[in-house]
Image: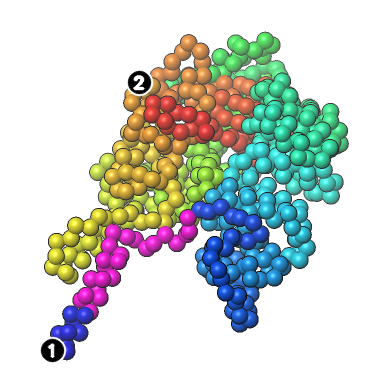
Amino acid sequence: MKHNELLTSLLLLGISLLLASCGQTPSKPLPESRESTGIIASQPDIELTEPTEPELEAMREALTQAELAWAEANFHHALSLAQTIRYSALSDQDQLRGLYLQAQLDSVFSAYPATLKAHQALLRYNLEPLGLRTSDIEERIYQLAVRHQDHATTVRYGLLPLLNPKVSPEYRRDRLMSIATAISHLKADQLIDISRQLPPTAQTVLASVAQPAVLERRNVGANLCQQWNDSNAFGTISANECHGDASETGQGALLIALPLSGRLKVAGEAILDGILFSHLNQAKRADLHIVDTEEVSDEALLSVLQTGQFSSMIGPLEKSRVQSWLTLSQATQARILALNTPENLTDSARGQHFYQLALSPEAEATFLADTVYGSGARRILIIRPQTDWGARTLLALRTRWQALGGVETATATYRGQEDYESSLRVALGVADSAARRRTLGRLSGLSMHLQARRREDIDAVIMLASSPEEARSIKPLLAFHFAEDLPVFALSAANDLPQQVDHKDLDDVVTLDIESLQPIPNETPSSPALARLIALGIDAYALSQLPELNAPLKSLYRGRTGLLWVDEQGFVQRRWKVLKYDKDERKTL
């Protein structure tokens, strides 16, 4: 009898545990976003007894252990310890330690506004007991603002260190580039508001660039350089950072080397349309000479450039030929603006005037990672096709996401439409939830009517769909599997839809793309993909005409494919437009 009672008890215990967990994957390990307050989190509005000395000692020890856990990157343990501490009962110095710890925890577990508020609160206190200076917190605020693309805060907290003559050239170069990029996104009235919060020297700098005539010009970097030089606030600093090799020029005859026949004919002709559009709209035009790379060898192109007749060449487009020009560019002084990236990115054997401008899906995936992280998401679900394109974009996304400190919670991989639902069910944990429900019914012998649930440890979904058909099929399935509340991000490939098609299946999806899919007035491209290539041609021509490209700040340019600049390795970097589907429109964020 006792044996039967024991079996019954164990069965009831098993059913109770299954009921508690039915429809769930492991519970969400992170707390909901919350606002940080005061020197320490506010206490409940109830009467509390004074802690005893042993209790105070335990709280002080918990604070120390939480700080150690944070230093060892054990963030969840640090959070659990911090939540056991009643800070208002501790000394002022321990409360300050708690405030600093809370600000650091907010940077991992809270939304950006709460994190910013927590760090700004630290600036009201004397931080010397913590071994910190006000400038340390301001630097951390600046880094957070850059990561979250908060342009106004980036300028406000990033400008002052540039006035310190002791900072290294590398530090100054990176800081100038970040501030100039942020300024290019702001309006004159925003810059004036920021300048009111800064010392007079910094006010002079911002006042010199807060001119609509300067900010509205496309070649914003050159104008910022000129204005900063005129303000004398940086002295020779901006002169060193703004100017490259004065002998290099983008003026003169221009050689266009594109595939105008063969398998890449359509792409080559679209890029050429953009180049010709820009060329015909120039008041002072360079001479153009157009060749078909399907009919002309690389050696023949090099011979033409070595005559000195052409100062620049736009092309080639083919990836294999770009690889060849890494080496060939050393034999000419002409500027080479290649329109693709080579297979071997580690190859350093390239000419001094060799640059690479491309609409690379890997570069786009890297920028998408920054965008998602800037939105406040830290744990992501990635959905990607099992193709070479999907593998390349996934690798680029993962590399950047890990560098940012984010967590890849799960990945759903599909080979075709028949895999969409099954891969999502597994990645979202719905399949496990359904399995537990069936197990519970089998153990209890009852008919169970419990709702399956998805896992709760996901902040956002990144959909690496390679076509609009994939994106339009996957997005509704997320809602079907209880993930309709998760923000969804996608690459520009999801946008390749005719204008007359209803976009409701992509409603609320955040995506990257160029500013306009119809860059040439009175012409309608046959597809959005071709429109991007036309925009690429427009940007290629504009960059070829800039006098200097080997100074990143001087090359900062508002292009049709995004905000562009050339880094020290000769790659043209891009900040894409971030758009959001809203019914039948895509609105800029």
The image shows residue 555 at horizontal and vertical percentages of 69, 30
Secondary structure of the residue carrying tag 1 is loop
Q: Residue furthest bottom?
A: 2
Residue beneath label 1, please? 1
Residue 500 is labelled as 2
Q: With 242 as the anchor, is 41 left or right in this view?
A: left
Secondary structure of the residue carrying tag 2 is loop
- Badge 2: residue crowd in 10 Å (few <14, some 14–19, many ≥20): few
Closer-to-camera residue (71/543)? 71
Q: Image quadrant of residue 137?
A: bottom right
- Which residue: 73% across, 31% down? 192
Q: Is residue 73 above or below residue 303?
A: below
The image shows residue 278 at horizontal and vertical percentages of 59, 16
* Amino acid type, callout 1: Met
- Which residue: 63% across, 54% down? 118
Q: With 326 as the anchor, is 318 left or right in this view?
A: left
Q: What span is in magenta?
A: 10-32
Q: Is residue 507 above or below residue 280?
A: below
Q: Earlier in the sequence, mark 1 or mark 2?
A: 1
Q: CA distance from mark 1 to mark 2?
A: 75 Å
Of badges 1 and 2, the one in the foreground is 1
Residue 574 is labelled as none
Q: Is residue 334 above or below residue 24?
A: above
- Which residue: 38% across, 34% down? 507
Closer-to-camera residue (375/237)? 375
Q: Is residue 374 above or below residue 187?
A: below
Q: With 148 as the anchor, is 135 left or right in this view?
A: right
The image shows residue 449 at horizontal and vertical percentages of 19, 57
Queried whether the magenta region covers residue 500, the answer comes back as: no
Q: Image quadrant of residue 127?
A: bottom right
Q: Is residue 396 visible?
A: no
Q: Image quadrant of residue 254?
A: top right
